[in-house]
Amino acid sequence: MGTVLVTGASGIAGREVSRVLAAAGHHVRRADIAPSADPADSAIGEFVRCDTRTPTDVLDAVAGCDAVVHLAAWHNAHQPGVSDATIFAVNVDGTFNVVQACRAAGIRSVVFASSMAYGWGSVYSVTKVLGEDLWKMYREVTGASVALLRYHGFVPEQYLRWGERLLRNGVDVRDIATATAAATEAALAGRIDLFSTIVHSDHALPKEVQDDFTTHGAAWAESRLPGATALIERHQLALPDRVEQHDLSAAADLLGWRPQHDFIEFLEDLQRREAAGEDVNDLWAPGRIPAS
Ligand SMILES: NC(=O)c1ccc[n+]([C@@H]2O[C@H](COP(=O)([O-])OP(=O)(O)OC[C@H]3O[C@@H](n4cnc5c(N)ncnc54)[C@H](O)[C@@H]3O)[C@@H](O)[C@H]2O)c1
């Protein structure tokens, strides 16, 4: 067990990651420009106010830590939107400052939040390319264990839209958190050198269902959950033509991590809510009623 710095700890992923790491027995230092809106989060671990654009803030936050989980970033989902200039400053300059602070503190274990948006399609996408490159440099120069996690999307949305999204590159934030915590453990144990994986849902789809979900999706869902077809029709869930699935075996082998939350679980949750007479139209996801 060690002290783990989580940057962006007040955000969607940061809160869940911090919770999972603390539950595993780590001392979690939560760093963000502002504390989480939920006062209960203070029980998770100490909070340090840290703007990653300010090098001395980051040096102070990293000092004394055994591992750094760098999540702090702006992305394109915020409303109103964050400017490209701010996205670049926080995601690139901020990451550079975290890299430099890690060098100064001799950090041997790092996890970086990258994205499936990684690429050249937007300023945000490029910040993830540069972010990954900075951490590759860190690995090269220091020999530290570095995990680069390319998350699929987990921004909360209306419950039914969220369910549909699980088949369209959506991933439950709980899977984000367990993957990130598993990568942190692997880095702390020195089980990885430079490790990169996509983090997404796994619906255990046979290949023909994955490739032609329009034709086979409803029958596949029915075989996994009796009543699924009627549920999909009643709620007019829009199914995708095909479902993107990636090989997650390296994450399973090296991190011991597998995603646990999928579309069928969502349908089961929806079925329970229906049985309980709940109106799901105003519901925001993720949100669940306890299994009966
Ligand atoms: N949400 C997604 O769907 C998604 C998908 C792929 C990758 N990611 C990546 O995952 C990470 C976490 O995303 P999220 O959805 O939890 O984001 P979020 O916006 O919910 O949280 C980000 C946190 O970073 C903090 N922050 C912003 N600027 C900062 C600064 N200068 N210094 C310190 N903290 C700062 C914010 O206050 C916020 O609490 C990000 O790196 C993001 O790019 C997110």
Image (spheres, helix red, strand yellow):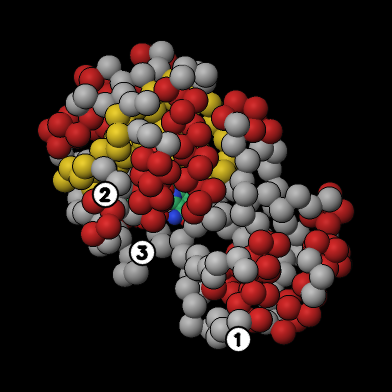
**Which quadrant of the structure image shows residue 29?**
top left
Residue at point 15%, 31% (across, down): 60
Residue type at the position of mark 2: Ala
Q: Earlier in the sequence, mark 3 or mark 1?
A: 3
The secondary element bearing badge 1 is classed as: loop
Instruction: Give the mark toward the camera: 3 or 1.
Output: 1
Callout 3 environment at 10 Å: few (<14), some (14 to 19), or many (20+)?
Answer: few
Mark 2 residue's CB less than 8 Å from ligand 1: no
**Relative to 82, is 23 above or below?**
above
**Which quadrant of the structure image shows residue 53?**
top left
Residue at point 23%, 20% (across, down): 105
Residue carrying label 3:
78
In percent of width and height, residue 125 lies at 45, 47
Q: Which of marks 2 and 3 is nearer the N terminus?
A: 2
Residue carrying label 1:
277
Instruction: Give the mark toward the camera: 2 or 3.
Output: 2
In percent of width and height, residue 106 lies at 27, 17
